[in-house]
Image (spheres, rainbow, N blue to C red):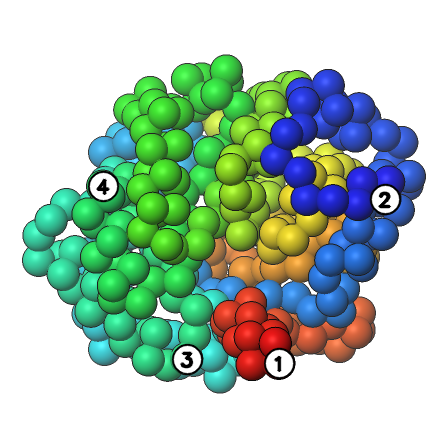
Amino acid sequence: MVNEIRNDWTIEEIQNLYNTPLLELIYKAASIHRKYNDTAEVQVCTLLSIKTGGCSEDCSYCPQAARYNTGVNVQALMKKDEVLQHAQRAKDAGSTRFCMGAAWREVRDNRDFDRVLDMVKGVNELGMEVCCTLGMLTEDQAQKLADAGLYSYNHNLDTSSEYYGEIISTRTYDDRLKTLDNVRKAGVTVCCGGIIGLGETHEDRVKMLYTLSTQLVHPESVPINALVRVKGTPLENNPKVDIWDMVRMIATARILMPRAMVRLSAGRAEMSVAEQAFCFMAGANSIFTGEKLLTTPNPGFDEDKAMFELLGLKPRIAFKEDKVFAEEEANA
């Protein structure tokens, strides 16, 4: 069994882990999860689309791309007060992290970015971990977000570098890695994972996990998404992702990155409570809750509350890592 945090995994090692017989893999992942984390604790996050649709990118899975006719209504950047109302409602319902997503290719230094910085400050003042996903960032923009109180930045790799060009042509894999580097330099935690069900091979999944687990510092949060097939996108007719493929990905990610929050993300709306329970057993300890994930369906707060009660789960407190570190320092 793996008992240490490693950043020197090889493709072959990850391949062997990934191909472990499923029940054995779940057992290994659950054992490591128990060693490094409180297995009853799940980080509850809420994601709000603060600027919807009209994106110039061509991501094949995304209903917000301007070039696809998906029925998504383009909406300008929301007002700060409205965003803070959403954040307060999410907090009252049990969320400890609030993520704001804008359908931009990249952040531009303009009044809209200034307004987002103001939103970050406002959510931070509510005592929630604040996360953004705004597209590509420069080093300076990442620093401005950090100075405003940003806790985490989401920028997914989506798939392997080899398959990436089949899904997106309007930016490169290196563009993604550069943004992650800029986020790290600013001292903001990294939220980075991918999507399965894009038409990729199992080898592509292994290679994506290799890229994530061999970063100098593992992403603090690793979302594992199942493709939500949206009518009007190029991938609308892809087959539904098999639940056991999700469990296998989550378990492998947990073994490779023991301390990361492994997030059971998009696709939960199509999963039963029993299927989600397997994901938690395999090492998932973070979810998005609320009726929508940007523009796609997601289980609501009440459904998740009932599931938590059934499975004996509890929400993780905000800023837990910081609080634990402060306590350790005080007791040193």
Residue found 73% across the figure and 58% down from its top: 36
Measure how far apart labels 1 and 3 are at the Cα level: 24 Å
Q: Quadrant of residue 247?
A: top right
Measure how far apart labels 2 and 3 are at the Cα level: 35 Å
| Residue 238 pos. (x, y %) | 57, 27
> Nearest the camera: 101 or 146?
146
Q: Quadrant of the C terminus?
A: bottom right
Q: Along the horizontal axis of the image, is 109 left or right of 130? A: left
**Which labelled disc corresponds to residue 127?**
3
- Callout 1 amino acid: Asn
Measure how far apart labels 3 and 4 are at the Cα level: 27 Å
Q: Is residue 223 visible?
A: no
Q: Earlier in the sequence, mark 1 or mark 2?
A: 2
Residue found 69% across the figure and 49% down from its top: 258
- Callout 3 amino acid: Gly
Secondary structure under badge 2?
helix
**Which labelled disc corresponds to residue 138?**
4
Q: Which residue is mark 1?
A: 331
- Above-or-below relation of 276 to 125: above
| Label 2 Cα crowd, 10 Å radius (few <14 / some 14-19 / many 20+) | many
Residue contact at pointers 2 and 3, CB within 8 angstroms: no
